[in-house]
Amino acid sequence: MMHTHFWSMGGYAAFVWGAYGVFIGLCSGIWVSVWRRVRRLEKQQDES
């Protein structure tokens, strides 16, 4: 199998790579959201 054929995913590359991109974007967004919430809660605990 040639590498170009693998990367083109048999003609479905736009869907496959787009789905990977959306997944990574959503996971990153969730991670950032949780990280910010933890930081905010830690600051609130330090103030009280």
Image (cartoon, rainbow, N blue to C red):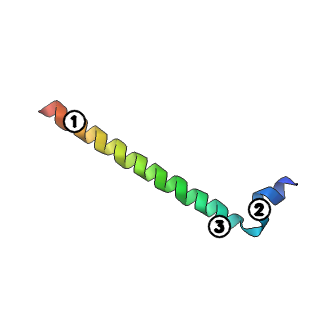
Q: What is the distance, in whole Å, between disc 1 and disc 3 at their CAs?
A: 42 Å
Picture quadrant where residue 36 is located: top left
Instruction: Judge the density around disc 3: few (<14), some (14-19), many (≥20) Cα neighbours within 10 Å.
Output: few
User: Residue 46 location in percent, x, y?
Assistant: 18, 30
Above/below status of 32 relative to 4: above
Q: Quadrant of the N terminus?
A: bottom right
* Dot 3: element: helix
> Mark 1 or mark 2, which is nearer the start of the sequence?
2
Q: What is the distance, in whole Å, between disc 3 and disc 2 at their CAs?
A: 10 Å
Q: Which three-letter amino acid code belongs to the residue tagged 1?
A: Lys
Q: Which mark is residue 43?
A: 1
* Dot 1: element: helix
**Residue farthest along the top direction in this orientation:** 46
Residue located at (65% from left, 60% from top) = 17
Residue located at (41% from left, 51% from top) = 30
Mark 2 and mark 3 in contact (Cβ < 8 Å)?
no
Q: Which mark is residue 15?
A: 3
Mark 3 and mark 1 in contact (Cβ < 8 Å)?
no
* Dot 2: element: helix
Instruction: Judge the density around disc 2: few (<14), some (14-19), many (≥20) Cα neighbours within 10 Å.
Output: few
